[in-house]
Image (tube, helix red, strand yellow):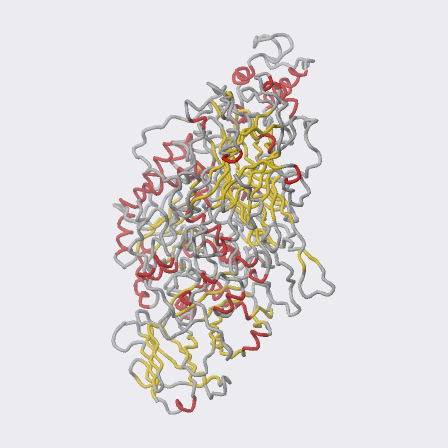
């Protein structure tokens, strides 16, 4: 097999060892030209005794994996590929010769596994109150020096205080016994086992036969990624490996399935990897020499998506293919797993020449920011400047710890083990917990884990660079597309374990963990989710560095991103809180129905407060609801008002004083000390129900089924879902990880609710819920104040209710919207009962409108002023598209981006052409629901097989009426506590022309006039400020000179700009104050030499003005203006100088009655 060393793109390399004292490669079939595998057998004494000689010639081996194929070749020493520059020894590298930034990654280890004895993961070991019988049973003998059995007669057995024994072995047991008798927690003895290239037994190349989504037979197929070339690596057995007939010394195995009255639907496969060999009865041998393997070691599979050489399309991802890999671990009922370390990564930087410097100087594309993702809905998410602390909760752990406790990295205490005896925890292990093995390397940096890392991100992280760009003298905002490269790493899913990325302060070292937290390894196969690593050149993305990763995750998990229509509704929580009743809910439903001519509400959500206690869902508050069929009567009343009824539930939670808690204490999760697990405090403490328990799942199934099929609710808001997988070993089945437990719980919920029910996740671990929920809360609760209000700490950046926290996460997680689900940013509060200023209400409405998520209000609708309601009316209806935060990865303001951009165009795509433009649904050929309109189909989540072209504009571009042209809508926000002059590159806000995209490096095949690209304008730009209704013309020289757009904004103020290339010879629609998009409100636009006709959408009542540019102002001096068929007038507000023409910008007042009849909404100008 020929080497791939000359391949210029991204390539994975594994330099295999050459020292005969560690491992000697042997060809599996003796033919290097047709090599299918390489057998690497460790030369230890036991293997030498089996006749394996250590005098075999030792050539150097190089394993390579890239989009064009896979190879394992023998090389002379002189030809051996040198590792990229790194401060540590490396096991594998991921690098590219063609990457301008020269970023590359090395990992010093193939894998590290942290174990503990299985019985130490068992509640009877970790609980503070333990019985001496269990101690004697687990130890097997009395710990005293006077007898060899549990005699029951000596003073120690009777609880006395005999002197400790002199034997070191018995002294250790004595110390443990004293901890037990005193009630102190016993120590957990963890050991970390490292695997490097020296531990490789066998390499199996898996070369795919074709690119694309059709499942390959020879390579590896991964859902959401497609066909891949792969390397499967078999590692030698070490500590924790399985053996024949092993049985656990504790009752830690998987519990038998119970008949609980329902069955879960089968799930589709995530990949086509063959079952591990330990699952096959006949698979006891490996390699051509049929050497028997008594123990199995872990198996690693590395994969890179195939590149189809015959494809005519060329996209940015062809240059920046990701690396994916996962681990399979053999079963052993005597061990429990705490974590997999899948990558001990180092980001290596290379110098590049800075152009224009004389004499030439060199600099680095150094990492400047890291995007950290929080565990669940409310957790902090956003970009943090390198070196600044990661924002977090200001509350003590007892009140907030469980809110953000995702994957937990349990340290191995720097211990190591070289014994292959994986069936018994020998005395050697006990001594090694006290001191590091003398053979352990001491020159490595301290391992990055949750304790030692400076940054911790759940599921994924993104390291980015501002490149060689620094903030300019005019203080303009740094934008992602002007910066340098980006590195994305994480997991495609969170269904096996919760994944964590730990990073150092300099963002140069990072570790990728899959966290088991004491998962007993007695099942046939324990595997990780697919890990993901991608390095993007700055030329490979102009908007979102995370776009490829997020698309892959959505497709991998069968996301429900656009299966349901957009949601506009009302929620009872923020005005009534728990104080709701049938009358107050019916009253607001009536008001919402009356307001439907202004805002088309389609949801009325009954939030918390209808039940007597959490968990007792059928016990309604007496006197508050109808006695007979109370919830059904309420749902029918809401539906009669033309809205979908929704209801709040916390299916995996119960109050401490609930009947459920009293009747079923065994359903409640307990922590390692045997106490009820802490769920954090949301104003009260509550209990979490164990999702591994089939009886709990039956309870949840019945609760959800009742709400949907008996009560009649179409929408479920499911809250505090993290309570199903609280940390603690007091669970029914400890062979499940926390992520597996939650995954099982989500499957139960969806099975009970049915496919048509709209499910909103809240307090929900994000990665696990992709494919199960239709909407997802992506922020903490909003609140009546900008910051958390006293007595809560105002400096909190965690989960406390506040408008700032709600807006921060809505912005930073906008990249997930319409790719994984509908983003739920929480409610926009309009009422005067809050302390929000008008600027803050406008900012909240602007962010929700621009990001295109769910739109919910939560006030007493009878008391909302017309002025505040008009703010919401200008956001409605939502466009169904999501704006791009231009400074998501370069924000300098605690993770809060300040600039959002949407594309708008008249260049629509016919619905019949969807397949031709890669707007496919995913590989499962899922049928979109009837609620998915033509618009949503076009702009929603649309995976493009293996390649997502960032230069296309489906997701961030909405289509408008012919004649309106193409433009951008950009919002600029000041999140500071004082007024500030904001400055942003004007060039980044305009609609790029085809020429601009070609200059930016867009592949020619991806450039199409059908994707909302503007035309190059030599006549400047019309700029209309929506909220202030101000117009200004900006000359073309501003773009040429790279001058910024400058706007002074008050504290917490947002302005939305409509920026359109000017045409001095044509009538142009400048915008309106009717809808924030300045175009979505228009049904048709016709402009002739003597007449202009505008038809505004008339299905909702609106009042405001439209703004037009008329190329020959004098011609229209005596024009006739009609609105709704009635004479009206227009006002000249500006006279821009465009190409010497005497053009004018005019304002025409309009009133739309919302009847949808006659000439309602028709504006005409005739001369």
Left or right: residue 991 versus residue 964 is right
Q: Position of residue 1035 (x, y in %)?
A: 54, 79
Instruction: Evaluate whether residue 410 shows in this view.
Output: yes
Q: Residue furthest right?
A: 359
Q: Nearer the viewer, residue 310 or 811?
A: 310
Name the residue nearer the viewer: 146 or 547.
547
Decide which of 869, 739 is in the foreground and name it: 739
Res. 184 visible in picture: no
User: Percent from the top left, x then y, of residue 551?
Assistant: 45, 51
Against 774, is 1054 above or below?
A: below
The number of numbered badges drawn on the structure is: 0
| Quadrant of the rendered image containing residue 1124 | bottom left
Asked where in the image residue 253 lies, by quadrant, the reply is: top left
Q: Position of residue 1036 (x, y in %)?
A: 54, 77
Whether 111 is drawn above or below 1076: the answer is above
Question: What is the quadrant of residue 911 in the picture?
Answer: bottom left
Q: Identify the image quadrant of the C terminus.
A: bottom left
Q: Nearer the viewer, residue 679 or 439?
A: 439
């Amino acid at each position: 097999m020929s080497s791939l060393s000359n391949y210029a793109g991204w390539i994975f390399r594994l330099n295999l060892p050459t020292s005969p004292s560690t491992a000697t490669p042997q060809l599996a079939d003796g033919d290097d030209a047709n090599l299918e595998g390489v057998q690497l057998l460790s030369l230890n004494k036991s293997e030498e005794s089996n006749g394996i000689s250590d005098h075999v010639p030792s050539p150097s081996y190089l394993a390579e994996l890239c989009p064009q194929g896979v190879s394992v070749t023998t090389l002379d020493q002189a030809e051996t590929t040198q590792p990229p520059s790194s401060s540590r020894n490396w096991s594998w590298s991921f690098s590219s010769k063609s990457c301008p930034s020269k970023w590359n990654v090395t990992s010093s280890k193939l894998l590290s596994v942290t174990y503990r004895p299985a019985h130490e993961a068992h509640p009877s070991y970790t609980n503070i109150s333990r019985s001496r019988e269990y101690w004697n049973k687990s130890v097997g003998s009395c710990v005293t020096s006077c007898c060899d059995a549990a005699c029951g007669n000596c003073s120690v057995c009777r609880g006395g205080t005999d002197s400790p024994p002199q034997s070191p072995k018995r002294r250790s047991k004595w110390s443990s016994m004293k901890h037990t008798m005193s009630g102190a927690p016993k120590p957990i003895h963890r050991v970390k086992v490292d695997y490097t290239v020296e531990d490789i037994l066998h390499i199996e190349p898996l070369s795919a036969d074709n690119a694309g989504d059709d499942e390959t037979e020879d390579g590896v197929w991964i859902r959401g990624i497609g066909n891949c070339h792969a390397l499967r690596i078999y590692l030698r057995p070490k500590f924790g490996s399985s053996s024949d007939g092993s049985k656990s010394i504790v009752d830690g195995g998987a519990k038998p399935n119970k008949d609980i009255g329902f069955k879960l639907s089968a799930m589709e496969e995530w990949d086509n990897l063959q079952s591990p060999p330990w699952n096959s009865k006949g698979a006891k041998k490996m390699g051509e020499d049929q050497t028997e393997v008594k123990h199995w070691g872990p198996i690693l599979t590395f994969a890179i998506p195939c590149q189809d050489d015959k494809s005519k399309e060329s996209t940015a991802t062809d240059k920046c293919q990701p690396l994916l890999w996962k681990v399979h671990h053999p079963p052993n009922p005597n061990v429990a797993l705490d974590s997999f370390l899948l990558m001990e990564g180092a980001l290596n930087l290379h110098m590049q020449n800075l152009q224009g410097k004389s004499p030439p100087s060199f600099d680095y594309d150094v990492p400047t920011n890291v995007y950290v993702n929080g565990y669940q809905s409310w957790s902090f998410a956003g970009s943090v400047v390198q070196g600044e602390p990661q924002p977090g909760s200001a509350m003590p752990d007892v009140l907030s710890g469980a809110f953000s406790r995702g994957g937990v990295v349990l340290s191995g205490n720097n211990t190591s083990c070289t014994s292959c005896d994986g069936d018994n925890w020998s005395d050697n292990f006990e001594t090694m917990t006290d001191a590091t093995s003398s053979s352990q390397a001491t020159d490595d940096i301290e391992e990055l884990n949750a304790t030692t890392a400076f940054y911790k991100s759940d599921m994924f992280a993104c390291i980015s660079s501002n490149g060689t760009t620094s903030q300019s003298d005019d203080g303009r905002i740094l934008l992602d597309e002007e910066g340098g490269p980006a590195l994305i790493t994480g997991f495609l899913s969170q269904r096996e374990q919760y994944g964590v990325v730990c990073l150092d302060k300099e963002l140069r070292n990072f570790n990728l963990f899959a966290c088991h937290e004491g998962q007993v390894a007695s099942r046939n196969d324990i595997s990780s989710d697919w890990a993901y690593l991608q390095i993007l050149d700055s030329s490979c993305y102009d908007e979102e560095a995370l776009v490829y990763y997020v698309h892959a995750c959505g497709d991998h998990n069968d996301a429900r991103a656009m299966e349901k229509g957009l949601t506009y509704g009302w929620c009872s929580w923020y005005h009534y809180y728990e104080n709701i009743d049938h009358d107050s809910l019916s009253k607001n439903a009536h008001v919402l129905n009356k307001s439907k001519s202004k805002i088309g509400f389609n949801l009325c959500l009954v939030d918390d407060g209808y039940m007597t206690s959490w968990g007792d869902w059928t016990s309604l508050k007496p006197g508050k609801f109808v006695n007979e069929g109370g919830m059904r009567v309420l749902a029918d009343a809401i539906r009669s008002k033309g809205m979908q009824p929704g209801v709040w539930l916390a299916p995996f939670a119960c109050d401490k004083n609930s009947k459920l808690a009293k009747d079923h204490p065994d359903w409640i999760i307990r922590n390692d000390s045997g106490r009820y697990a802490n769920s954090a405090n949301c104003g009260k403490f509550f209990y979490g129900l164990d999702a591994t328990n089939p009886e709990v799942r039956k309870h949840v199934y019945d609760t959800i089924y009742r709400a949907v099929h008996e009560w009649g609710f179409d929408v479920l808001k499911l809250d505090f879902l993290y309570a199903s997988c609280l940390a603690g070993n007091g669970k029914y089945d400890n062979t499940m990880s926390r992520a597996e437990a939650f995954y099982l719980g989500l499957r139960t919920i969806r099975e009970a609710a049915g496919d048509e029910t709209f499910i909103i996740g809240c307090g929900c671990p994000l990665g696990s819920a992709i494919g199960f929920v239709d909407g997802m809360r992506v922020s903490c609760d909003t609140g009546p104040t900008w910051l958390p209000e006293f007595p809560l700490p105002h400096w909190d950046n965690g989960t406390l209710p506040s408008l700032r926290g709600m807006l921060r996460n809505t912005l930073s997680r906008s990249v997930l919207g319409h790719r994984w689900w509908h983003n739920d940013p929480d409610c926009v509060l309009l009422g005067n009962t809050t302390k929000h200023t008008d600027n803050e209400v406008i900012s909240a409405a602007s962010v929700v409108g621009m990001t295109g998520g769910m739109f919910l209000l939560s006030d007493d609708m009878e008391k909302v002023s017309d002025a505040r309601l008009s703010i919401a009316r200008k956001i409605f209806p939502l466009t169904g598209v999501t704006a791009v935060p231009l400074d998501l990865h370069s924000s300098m303001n605690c993770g809060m981006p300040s600039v959002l951009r949407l594309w708008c165009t008249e260049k629509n795509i016919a619905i019949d052409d969807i397949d031709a433009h890669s707007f496919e649904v995913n590989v499962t050929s899922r049928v979109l629901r009837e609620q998915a309109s033509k618009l949503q189909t076009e702009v929603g989540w649309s995976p493009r097989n293996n390649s997502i072209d960032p230069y296309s504009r489906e997701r961030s571009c909405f289509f408008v009426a012919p004649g309106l042209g193409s433009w951008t809508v950009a919002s600029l926000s000041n999140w500071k506590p004082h007024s500030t002059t904001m400055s942003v590159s004007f060039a980044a806000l305009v609609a790029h022309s085809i020429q601009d995209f070609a200059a930016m490096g867009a592949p020619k095949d991806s450039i199409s006039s059908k994707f909302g690209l503007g035309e190059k304008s030599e006549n400047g730009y019309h700029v209309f400020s929506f909220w202030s209704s101000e117009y200004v013309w900006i000359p073309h020289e501003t773009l040429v000179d790279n001058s910024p757009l400058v706007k002074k904004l008050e504290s917490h103020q947002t302005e939305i700009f409509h920026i359109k290339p000017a045409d001095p010879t044509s009538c142009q629609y400048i915008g309106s104050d009717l809808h924030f998009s300045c175009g979505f409100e228009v049904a048709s636009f016709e402009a002739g030499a003597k007449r202009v006709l505008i038809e505004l959408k008339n299905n909702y009542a609106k009042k405001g003005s439209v703004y037009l540019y008329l190329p020959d102002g004098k011609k229209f001096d005596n024009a006739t203006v009609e609105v709704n068929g009635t004479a009206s007038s227009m006002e000249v507000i500006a006279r821009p100088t465009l190409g010497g023409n005497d053009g004018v910008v005019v304002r025409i007042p309009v009133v739309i009655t919302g009847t949808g009849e006659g000439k309602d909404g028709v504006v005409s100008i005739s001369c």
